[in-house]
Amino acid sequence: MKRGWIGSALAQALVYTFAATGIAAAQTETGPVNGAIGLQPAATEVAQDIANFHDLLLWIITAVTLFVLALLLYVMLRFNKGANPTPKKFTHNLTVEVIWTVVPVLILVFISLFSFPLLFKQERIPQAELTIKAIGNTWRWDYSYPDQGVDITSLPLSEEDAKAQNRPFRMAVDEPMYVPAGVNVRMLVTSNDVIHAFSVPSFGIKEDAVPGRINETWFNVPKEGIYYGFCQELCGTLHGFMPIEVRVVSKAEFERWVQSKGGQLASAEPAPAAPAAPTAPAPDATPAPVAPATPG
Amino acid sequence: MATNQTAHADEHAHGDHRPSPYNPLRWLFSTNHKDIGTMYLIFAIIAGVIGGAMSGLIRWELAEPGVQIFWGMADAGNLGTDKLFSVQMPDGSHKAIFGNEHGYNVMVTMHGLIMIFFMVMPAMIGGFGNWFVPLMIGAPDMAFPRMNNISFWLLPVAFALATISMLVPGGSMGQGFGGGWTLYAPLSTSQQLHGGPSMDLLILSLHIAGISSILGAINFIVTIFNMRAPGMTLHRMPLFVWSILVTVWLLLLSLPVLAGAITMLLTDRNFGTNFFNAAGGGDPVMYQHLFWFFGHPEVYILILPGFGIVSQIVSTFSKKPVFGYLGMAYAMVSIGVIGFIVWAHHMYTVGMGLELEAYFVAATMIIAVPTGIKIFSWIATMWGGSIDLKVPMLWAIGFIFLFTLGGVTGVVLANSGIDTVLHDTYYVVAHFHYVLSMGAVFAIFAGFYYWLPKMSGLKYSGLLGGLHFWIFFVGVNIIFFPQHFLGLQGMPRRYADYPDGFAYWNYVSSIGYAITAVGALVFFYMLLDMFVLRRRKLETAENASPWGEGATTLEWTLSSPPPFHQFNELPVVAEEKHH
């Protein structure tokens, strides 16, 4: 997985670590970094493919732009009225016209060789071990783990709370979305009111949350850590204040978290003596796959 | 009045005797394409100042993390007069003039709508189109002069409705409509969020602006098809006329779709229909399809006349005919045609399905080919020429470079695979401002500096024009280039506030705005200098054509300013004397 122009050194700098309160160990946090000029470091294979493809495109578009700039500078110097007082009168040259039609076509064909496989990889959702449903509301995200019977509401931390907990304001939330590391996660995205969009840049995913539809996407994050995302479709006054925080944790920790939220583990073996939660699991909390085609 | 009537009687005898500019009826009842063109240009300048001031508020708000001027809901309690743009109400409480984050969304929405419908389109099509299409094809006026009048006068009405929409209740979130220029349902139809009259006024405003444009489009199509001077065949028309012809066809075919879509918004809002309401069996995504079926041709409507303007200027100041004339004309035609079948690349993330996405990726990338033909043909026009870097040429070359830069990021965004990361981020904002704010606006300034002496008969200061160009060139690049970085880092569009991780480049971008604003001041000083302070008339020798031998189109055969009624005897266009 080699990163191109942006450079692996920069990618390293984009990942910053600090001890987050509330979690015992130091956590890798991935989100926007002040002054950075490239993509956020890729947390999934798809995101890495996107980054590689973007690096390739960046080379191509930089070359094209510099080529046009060089031509412009050349004609301005070589053919300005001082250097070339008598203009030529030609208006056609079949050869160059064919070249500047065919060469761009070839470049585009070359680009599409990488573009389509990436698209197919993103859109073909593999067998998933965990399904999470993200529901957009004005203005917060709800997360539902249908197989585990966990439903949480995620609100951004207030400025005071963020400061007190040493967490990034406008990104950190009170109830993050937990996922186990190294597992294919299927995200179902929908909305209760207006259109929102669920996105985590470092995962390479963005899916509109449209009322009446359930959209699908997927990710698989091998590395544990905290990953930040945003609502990316204008949804009203507090559009900028419904951040997404994803905690990628070990399987064991994920199971502990599910139990702490009163959920049941979906795996074959029944949860070993789940602590009797004050509120018993809802009657319909038995594992039941949701039908994604059902219009909400 | 009496004197005016005398003047009016005179003018039939002498085509160059124009009525007094101080008579309001000359403007109100005008059927003269040049007067109407002038009104369009002045209207566009006013709208541009308002839309530009709005972008100033946007950049001010985004200069640093936290609230600067759109005091948020959380601040409402402790607002004091010490906070910017906070005023004391009669009851002693404090209120933020521009509202909260919703006020920010209103600014973003109206900035987009004003710049598109009330600045770029009136300037290019209404202004330069009205002025120079009849002149360039050797016609005495537009085909339907009275329809031309109402095309213009509907526009201030539409603009007034749009302005009023900002001042009336928008819904539970505050005054005005804050759903973005795309007016996506269900945000725009939500009774809870946008239940107020604001959105209805905006729909009405767009309807009227749309009617204005459709009438204008019909007028241009009939004029260009029927009123060309003898010998001015379609394949001899100047490229600017070609660009307007393609543009108005796009308008005529796409605007009715917008009108249908926003009418459905109107009935969804007020009459209980459920076109876009999922709970009632409708589909919000259908609105997006309808909107972008209009919206994508619309962005070509904004840029195609710029292509035409730049072609004229590059040819004039290289003293060389346009390279590959037919290729240039049909590149615009094919851009217009393909522009109708790529709309869903604006909605890759709605969940439209793999096959559809793959199709739109392929179709979108194809547009790069005719666009590339245009860029390289402009350079080939300059190649071997004798280039005079006067002010219009500076803007035109600036256009070519910056449009290329904006175009190549379009190729990146065309790939749905990458768009999953970049969609609705500042990368998109940077992309479309490079092609519009620098493409279309640079083309407008190029055309303005190119034709201003023709329209006024006056000389402007090349020094001030050049200064304007260079300050603008530096300023807009400082605004928008860093926005690519913000977008790559994931910064979403239309955020009134953002995490600290986006602070640095936002600050740089806001500095760029300040620089650009200085450039705008230079522009207005240039106008003041030209029209009031010095008022230098073009010398007799260069009166018809101040740009010399390179300016070969018909408008340069007339005096500057052209007679009030021109071509009473139609010019005959010879084989080699065209474009």
Image: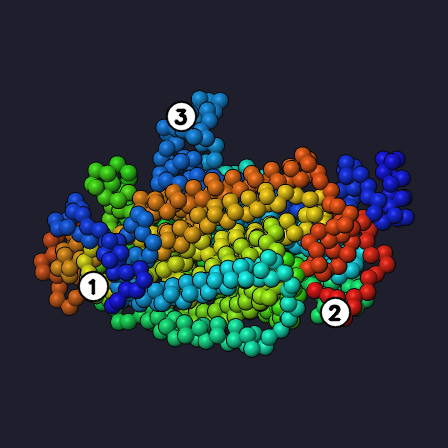
Measured Cα–Cα span from mark 3 to mark 2: 69 Å
Gap between marks 3 and 1 measured at Cα: 50 Å
Find residue B384 and report its image quarter. Answer: bottom right
Q: Can residue A132 be seen in the rendering of this structure? A: no
Residue located at (35% from left, 41% from top): B65
The kind of secondary structure element at disc 1 is loop
Q: Which mark is residue B474?
A: none
Q: Position of residue B316 (x, y in %)?
A: 66, 59
Q: What residue is shown at x 32% (from left), y 58% (from top)?
A: A39
Label 2 resides on the chain identified as B
Please name which of the two marks, 1 or 2, marks the residue nearer to the observer.
2
Residue B395 image point, x, y percent:
57, 52
Position of residue B559 in the picture relative to residue B257 (left or right): right
- Front in this rendered view, residue B12 or A214: B12
Q: Position of residue A242 (x, y in %)?
A: 34, 48
| Residue A9 left/right relative to B308 | left
Kindly indicate whether the residue at mark 2 contacts the one at mark 3 (C-beta within 8 angstroms).
no
Callout 2: 10 Å neighbours few (<14), some, many (20+)? few
User: Who comes first in sequence, dot 3 or dot 2?
Assistant: 3
- To which residue does mark 1 refer? A222
* Label 3 in the same subunit as label 2: yes
Q: Which residue is mark 3?
A: B82
Q: CA distance from mark 1 to mark 2?
A: 69 Å
The quadrant in which the C terminus of chain A is found is bottom left
